[in-house]
Image: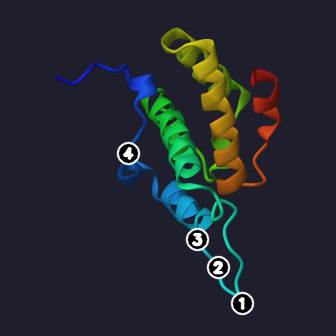
Amino acid sequence: MARYRHPVTVGLPFEQWPALDQEAWSVANQTGDLLRGSGPAAGWRPKTRRTVRKAYGNWLCYLEQTGQLKDAASVGRRLTAENLTGYIAALRARVSARTAVTQLRSLSQAFLALDPDADRDLLKPAI
């Protein structure tokens, strides 16, 4: 029998990510050749890739549940103080402090790979 998991700890499946995010993830993980460079996440180990993808899926799930998912023109524009504060509160209500910190670190890695121009300074104090 499957164990019930609250939606904040179950991420949005990749197939349900917005097209913009799916494209950014694909580009970030693209392996390059001599003429074109690799994406920022191309050299990650498979476990790191799964962990970061899951954390980003959790973030997207939270944004979808709060109606914030479709409001941004870029991946990094969703990373606002308001969204992050709400996400951290939701994490704290459902998971241990250590798990919340791990999720936030992985989310920071996701933004670094998906949108290097995103203001990740918002995440640093929380981590």
Label 3 and label 1: CA atoms lie apart by 13 Å
Instruction: Report if the CB atoms under discs 2 and 4 are less than 8 Å apart.
Output: no
Label 4 and label 1: CA atoms lie apart by 33 Å
The answer to which of marks 4 and 3 sits earlier in the sequence is 4
Label 2 and label 4: CA atoms lie apart by 26 Å
Residue 48 position in % (x across, y down): 59, 47
Identify the element where label 3 is drawn: loop
User: In the rendering, which numbered label is found on residue 13?
Assistant: 4
Q: Residue at x 66, y 30 (%)?
A: 104
Which quarter of the image is occupied by the C terminus?
Answer: top right
**Residue under pointer 2:** 32
Identify the element where label 4 is drawn: loop
Residue 77 position in % (x across, y down): 68, 45
The answer to which of marks 3 and 1 sits earlier in the sequence is 3
Tell how many labels.
Answer: 4
Label 4 and label 3: CA atoms lie apart by 20 Å
Q: Is residue 70 above or below residue 36?
A: above
Residue 17 is left or right of residue 56, and the answer is left
Q: Residue at x 70, y 40 (%)?
A: 108
Residue 124 is left or right of residue 98, and the answer is right
Residue 112 is left or right of residue 30, and the answer is right
User: In the rendering, which numbered label is found on residue 30?
Assistant: 3
> Which amino acid type is shown beneath numbered disc 4?
Pro
Place residue 101 in its image quadrant: top right
